[in-house]
Every structure is written in structure tokens, then in C-alpha cells.
Image (cartoon, helix red, strand yellow):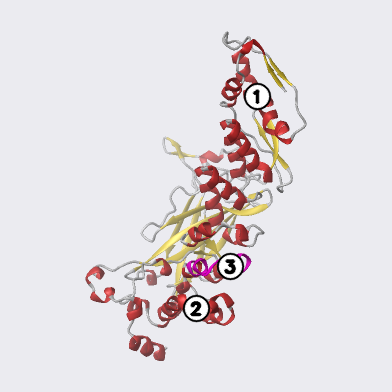
Amino acid sequence: MLSVHQGRSIGGLIMIACCFLCMQASPTGNTSVSDAVQHSARLLAHLAKLLNNPGTSDIMLIVRPRNSVSSSSSIGYLYTGHVDVRLDHCTALHALATELGVPALCVGLSTLMAENLPYGPVVSWYTYAIHAKDQILASQCNRFMAWNFSAIAASSEWPQLSVTHILQLLQRSDLVIESEMALFSAIELWIKRNQPNSSVVEAMLGSIRYPMMSSLELLELLKVSTTLKRHLHTIEHAINTAFRFHSVSPHEFGRFVDLTQPSFIPRNYLGLGWGRAWAIQNPARDDRSMTFKTWLSPSSRDRSRSVSWNAIFSPRQKVLGSGRTSEASYGHGGSSVSPARLSPHLVVISSSRKADIPGLHYQKTVLVGVRKKGTMVVQGAYSFHHSSEEARGFLKSADLISRFSDYLVDSALHLHIIVKPVYQPLLGDENDEHNNIKNDKFPKDVYRKDKTQS
């Protein structure tokens, strides 16, 4: 219960006080444990200012708590600046705060959800953020799901994703997944669980990038996938195009088919041949290097040919002035050197002439894994092209010194470097009459001849 003396409205007072609040979150491991939105200190400071204001100092608040969930959380927050909330109750409390007109609590809850994406119901949070028109939270949820797609697809929330959201994810080339085959399996599982109409199934199957599967994977898919068998008539053209892509040289294939279409653009695949994981022990100590190989191109004809790469990591120090640089010692117990003095750099360069192929460039993506309350997640992704050897802004604000840093797991920085061969039109291709030939007009004699030779 609430009484207001001197005939003044208290609603405006409370909302003014709540506009200056900040958020704190305590650790939690699952959605049943409460986190805290703690705004008490600033609330009291602001109330003290109101006390010295002649226009508000004659107001008396008399609060009598009631035995209801809303009063013990949102109504209690209004007078204390503090609320404990379970992760799976965040959206309900956010909706109540929106209805009551408490923007500071809404911001605090949105921040709380964003910081707990690895442990909360991220799919439900994304759905709510879209409904509540919280674009920042929706963007953060969407990016987290794209970078940690395998974990989302294996979770109990996967069948709850909406059709629209899945189709949006399927358009992304930055989707992190083991392989396109693994992506197809996840989509097929969703289809079997939700039993959507044929148009939805065909739209989803049509968004799979079949040329990114090998010829053997395509044959296996045709053999074992019941979903594909039922809808083969609608995507048979895409399957045939994929087989043709693998049966002739990419240069020959590119004369008849536009290789800049999304179907021929790799996603961020974690599987063999696309890159390599790299754990750098004590990264603040000194420079490190690594060599690895990737496929020359996604075509099965090039799977036996590889490109060699050198990756060089440096925790290079920033110049402090007069040409001086700071030297960071790294001990087991930590270091007194400020993380802000480090300026990590990562360079990925080709050590093979095979990488210089007309019409083909290599996009390099570096995934950064961090530990969030015991769970490994992808925290960042840095992409740069063949013409740029260095990842810009790499780990600009990361703490690579403190042993308690989220970026260090067992004293190591965990990276995964992916190299994606991406086709681009050659100079003068726009005038090549062959590029006007549609996929279904692909010369069968070329296909058969090359297939016989292979």
C-alpha cells in the first residue's frame, strides 16, 4: 500500500528517481537462480537531492508491501532500487516495468539478459525483444545465435525458433557451424518437430548451400534424408547444380553460372579443410606463429590441392611516448601491467602461390572463444579479405594478462581461424555472353565430358 501526503502525485517522483540508475549482476549458472538489478545507491542519492528541493521535500511516502509477486519484485524495486530476478523471469518483469513506465529497470533487465546470453533462454529472449521492439537486445541475441549456432541447434529451444528467424539465419554467411551438412541436419530436425506446410519446408531447403557439401555428402543426403526425398522435386535443380559444380573446374563452371550467388559463398565452417583452432598459452608473453592448410576452393576437384597459411599473433605494446614501449611480464599470479597497454595484432598471410588465382579471393575470419561462467562461447568474430593481411581492431579491449580474464581459459587464448574461398567476377565478365546462360541451360556435353575424364 502507498500513501501520499500533501496531495502530490508520487508516480513522477519515482520515475524521475529511477532515471539515474545503473545495473549490477551476480553470477548464476542456470535460469532458476536469481540475478540482481541493484540500483539502491543512486536511488538514495537522488532521493537525498529531492529532499533538499523545496518543491519535493514536503512529500511523505508510506509503503506497506503486499504479498504478490509483482509487489515483491517490480513494485519493491521502485522503493529500494534493488530486485532479484530469475533469468527465466526477466521478460515478464521487463513487460511489467514497461507497463509501469520505469525505463531504467527496462534498461537494467535488457543489459542483464545481454550479459547472460550463454545461460539464459536466448531464443525466448530474442522473441520477446522483437515483440517489445528492443532492437539492441534483439541484435545481440541474433548475433549470439549466429556465432554459437551449433549450441543453439542442440538445445531444447531449437524447435521454438520461428520460421522467419530461421530463414533469416539461413541467409547469413557468418553463421558458425561445423559444416553445411550439419546445418541441413539441424533444419531437418526442426522440420520434423514442427511439421510446417510445404511452402515453408521448400523455402528452408532452398536456403541450404548445397555446393558447399562434397559430392559424397550430397549422395549420402539423397540416400538417407526423408525430408529431401519428399521435396526433391522442388530443389532438384539446386542439387543438380551442386553436382555440376563439383564435376567440372570452377573456371569452366563459372562461364555458365554466377559463382557470386549466396549458394557458392561458404559460411564460417569449423570442419576440416576450412581452418584451424589455435590455443595460445600465456598470450601476453611474446609473439607466436602457426602454420596450417586449407582447401584451394570448395570444389571437390580441388580437395586434393591446398593453400598454406602463416598466422602470427603479437601482444605488441603501444608506444608510450618518446619512442618508449612498455614491457609486460607475465607471471602465474598475474601482472601489474595494465591490459590497456597491450595492443594485440593478428596477421594471416599465404605462404603459397596457389592463393593467387584470378577470380578467387580468400576471406579470413578469426573467432574468439571466451569462458562465461564455465561455458565456452564465441565472443567475437573478426573478418578481413585477402588484400588485407591483418585483422583490424583485434581484441582491442580484451584483458590478456589477468588469470581471471574471460578471454583466458586455462591460461590460454582460444582462437579459430577460418579461410573461406570466395569467387568474384573477373574483369570483363559482364560482357561475356556465357554469363547470360541460366543454370538450367548448362551444357550437358561439357558436364558429361569432364565427368568421364575425372
Secondary structure, mark 1, is helix
Callout in the foreground (1, 3) = 3
Q: Which mark is residue 411?
A: none
- Whether tag 2 and tag 3 are in contact, CB under 8 A, the answer is no
Q: Give the range drawn in magenta.
A: 189-203
Vertical order, 43 against 202 (above or below): above
Residue 168 position within the rendered picture, expressed as x and y whole percent measured from the top left: 48, 58
Residue pictured at 60% horizontal, 10% vertical: 52
Asked whether 6 or 277 is in front, the reply is 6
- Whether tag 1 and tag 3 are in contact, CB under 8 A, the answer is no
Q: Residues within 10 Å of mark 3 (few under 14, many from 20)?
A: some
Residue 363 position within the rendered picture, expressed as x and y whole percent measured from the top left: 42, 62
Residues at marks 2 and 1, CA–CA distance in whole angstroms: 63 Å
Q: Which mark is residue 41?
A: 1
The residue sitting at the bottom extreme is: 452
Callout in the foreground (2, 1) = 2
Asked whether 234 or 152 is in front, the reply is 234
Residues at marks 2 and 3, CA–CA distance in whole angstroms: 15 Å
Residue 18 position within the rendered picture, expressed as x and y whole percent measured from the top left: 59, 26
Residue topped by disc 3: 191
Task: Tell me which label, 2 or 1, sits earlier in the chain.
Answer: 1
Q: What type is the residue that disc 2 sits on?
A: Leu
Vertical order, 142 against 50 (above or below): below
Asked whether 62 or 224 is in front, the reply is 62
Relative to residue 34, is residue 220 drawn left or right?
A: left
